[in-house]
Amino acid sequence: MTSHVDIQTRNMELTDRIHDYVIQKVEKLDRHLAQIENVRVELTHSKSARNAADRYTAEVTAHGKNLLLRAEERADDIRLAFDTALDKMDRQVERYKGKHYRGRGDGRTAADVAEPIIDEETGELSPLVARRKRFELVPMTEEEALVQMRELGHDNFFVFYNAESGRVNVLYRRRNGSYGLIEPVIG
């Protein structure tokens, strides 16, 4: 078991049943990652929550040497909120283990494993920048750049000279489907 489990509550009473439930579930975290030294669980009840699904909040924080993981969830039942937060914590533990423990297994760094790229024509190492592209920047507005981006089929980004600001801008598609605009400023 982890060396210390601290359970705190706000606006609710910590019953023995909930205490035992939390301890039993938190003990399983230590099996997955032995580095966890202590776990802090904060359970909160909010009577005036706008949504019934946000009435209970469970926050789980795991501390260890060079380790800090935190998960928070809300639900209409304290056990559901805690279980969901613990599921999030499990995913974070797996991600942490993947980054720190799993590797090639032979102790070599990525630089050692990567094969050098040799130019077939000259037989020499190829440069770090594999391709350079030059194009003429035509002044246009943001709306014209968006139309141009769609017409050219550039799904991720489009570089253009903004006629309104007189600067080079980058129009890009965000994960949610909307667009973003990068306006570099020389400092």
Image (tube, helix red, strand yellow):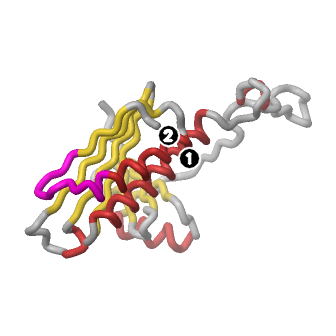
Seen in the picture, residue 152 relative to 27 is either above or below; the reply is: below
Q: Position of residue 166 (x, y in %)?
A: 31, 49
Q: Is residue 175 left or right of residue 38?
A: right
Q: Position of residue 123 (x, y in %)?
A: 91, 28
Q: Is residue 124 left or right of residue 33?
A: right
Q: Identity of the amino acid at label 2?
A: Asp
Residue sitting nearer the eye, 38 or 162:
38
Q: Of the two numbered discs 2 and 1 on the same chain, state the one appearing first in sequence.
A: 2
At 65% from the left edge and 42% from the top edge, which residue is drawn?
132
Q: Position of residue 114 (x, y in %)?
A: 78, 32
At 29% from the left edge and 46% from the top edge, which residue is drawn?
41
> Number of numbered discs present?
2
Give the residue at mark 2: 30
Q: Identity of the amino acid at label 1?
A: Glu
Are there few (<14), some (14-19), or many (20+) residues within 10 Å of tag 2? Answer: some
**How far separated are the C-alphas under marks 2 and 1?**
12 Å
Q: Splitting the image into 4 quarters, where does residue 66 fall?
A: top left
Secondary element at image label 1: helix
Q: Is residue 125 left or right of residue 18?
A: right
Q: Is residue 45 left or right of residue 129?
A: left
Stretch in magenta: 8-19
Give the residue at mark 1: 94
Residue 13 on the magenta span: yes
Secondary element at image label 2: helix
